[in-house]
Image (cartoon, rainbow, N blue to C red):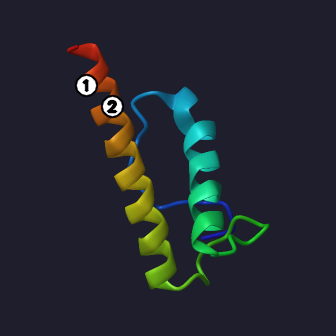
């Protein structure tokens, strides 16, 4: 499988969110001090680093959703 190709079966519900999710990925990686390769191929990245990025992205998305719901029900 070449660089930039993915085997993931995840499909975004809102395709326009792709750019925002990519930006979030780079922000989280930067905060954790993890360098994402310039070519976008993350096959050589340590599993621990990839998991840390994914876990922190999930944590932040849940926090955003909770804040949104809290504001909605006030």
CA distance separating discs 2 and 1? 5 Å
Residue drawn at the location 63% of the way across and 55% of the way down: 27
**What kind of element bears circle 2?**
helix
From the image, tell me which residue sits under label 2. Answer: 67
- Name the quarter where the N terminus is drawn: bottom right
Question: Label 2 crowding class (10 Å Cα cut-off): few <14, some 14-19, many 20+?
Answer: few
**What kind of element bears circle 1?**
helix
Q: Is residue 47 above or below residue 1?
A: below
Residue drawn at the location 73% of the way across and 72% of the way down: 37
Residue that protrudes farthest toward the front in the picture: 74
Q: Is residue 9 visible?
A: no
Residue drawn at the location 61% of the way across and 84% of the way down: 44
Q: Is residue 26 above or below residue 18?
A: below
From the image, tell me which residue sits under label 1. Answer: 70
User: Residue 61 placed where, x, y %?
Assistant: 39, 44
Pick the residue in front: 16 or 60: 60
User: Residue 74 placed where, x, y %?
Assistant: 22, 13
In this image, 19 relative to 72: left or right?
Answer: right
């Amino acid at each position: 499988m070449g660089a930039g190709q993915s085997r993931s079966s995840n499909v975004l519900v809102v395709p326009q969110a792709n750019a925002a999710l990519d930006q979030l990925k780079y922000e989280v990686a930067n905060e954790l001090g993890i360098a994402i390769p310039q070519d976008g191929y993350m096959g050589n990245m340590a599993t621990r680093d990839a998991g840390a990025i994914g876990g922190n992205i999930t944590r932040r998305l849940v926090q955003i959703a909770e804040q949104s719901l809290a504001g909605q029900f006030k």
